[in-house]
Amino acid sequence: MRARWVRRLLLMVCAASVASVTALGFASWASAAPTGQVYLVQAMAGTTLALSVDGTVVQAAAAPKTVVGPLSLAAGQHVIKVMSGSKALVSARFGVTGRDSLDVVVHRASDKAMSPVVTVFKNDLAAVGPGKTRLVVSHVAVAEPADIRVDGTPYFRNVANGESLSLVVPARTYSLDVVATAAGNRTILAPVRAALEAGTLTRVFAFGNPDEKTTDAIVQVVKVPVVGAGRPTSVHTGDGGQAADEFAGSHPLPWLSIAGGLGLLALAGGFGAASGSLRSLAATGGRPRR
């Protein structure tokens, strides 16, 4: 009777341990859910702005050309609110998924009212080749559709306000300018020289109002991976294996907890079986039953 009681007690203790430790492990795993990185870009010429995200002020006095971030935001919906002094200019909702990299740009539309607007651009952080860079030029100026020229050659044509195009180029210094697509090629952004480094994403925002002579460029540089350079130090064998390695390597606690708990249960079962054998031997005077 006593051995049976001991066995039941051990089983109860082990079950409670498995439940609590496993819950702790899954809580730790859940708390490490991926987040996105968000940059707030102030592209309203001649105005100082207060920028808030989800009700929290992240920049109380952002001058033009200010880039705030990266902010680590959880996956889901978020709200940016833009103030000028005590006046609310615009608010907008934007979505974030795990491991996103976003530019949330505050600028003026190209309508007659030059209304404040928010445009979200997703950053392409895909790898580039050795000696290469990804160049992205965005038109957020108060102007008509335009051609974006690189060293005098129109690479992007008829780009409207709020639109963006990209290309991968060798890393070196380029001259960038923006001219109206319509006849006459009115200058929207005068030539800007940009030194592009290898292994980067370089984003150029053309903003301001050419009629008021306030056009300028905001340049943002983000590192990206490089592929095809040097001898590899390790070999990945496919997305499935990488995902499994990441999951197990980053969050081992739940599985170790379960394995450890099962081991304790097995130990308890073995102890109970051993106790039963001892009772049997004692009942037969030390001789095994046939």
Image (cartoon, grey):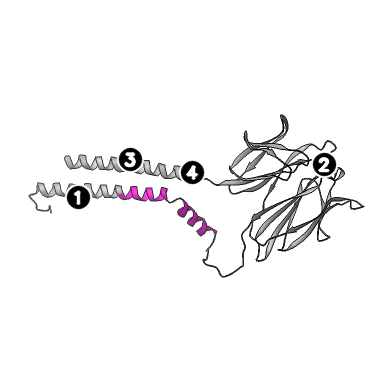
For label 2, the residue is 110
| 274 displayed left or right of 95 | left
Q: What amino acid is labelled 1 in the image?
A: Ala
Secondary element type, mark 1: helix
Q: What amino acid is labelled 4 in the image?
A: Ala
Quarter of the image for residue 166 reads bottom right
Position of the N terminus by quadrant: top left
What segment is highlighted magenta in the picture?
239-263
Residue 101 % position (x, y): 63, 49
Label 2, label 4: how far apart the Cα atoms are? 44 Å
Nearer the camera: disc 4 or disc 3: 4
Residue 145 % position (x, y): 84, 48
Q: Residues within 10 Å of mark 4 (few under 14, many from 20)?
A: few
Nearer the camera: disc 2 or disc 3: 2
The mark nearer the N terminus, 2 or 4, is 4
The mark nearer the N terminus, 2 or 3, is 3
For label 4, the residue is 30
Residue 52 % position (x, y): 65, 36
Q: Which mark is residue 259?
A: none
The mark nearer the N terminus, 4 or 1, is 4
Nearer the camera: disc 3 or disc 1: 3
For label 1, the residue is 274
Q: Residue furthest bottom?
A: 231
Q: Is residue 3 or residue 62 the one in the foreground?
A: 62
Label 4, label 1: how far apart the Cα atoms are? 40 Å
Q: Residues within 10 Å of mark 2 (few under 14, many from 20)?
A: many
Q: What amino acid is labelled 3 in the image?
A: Ala
Magenta stretch encompasses residue 244: yes
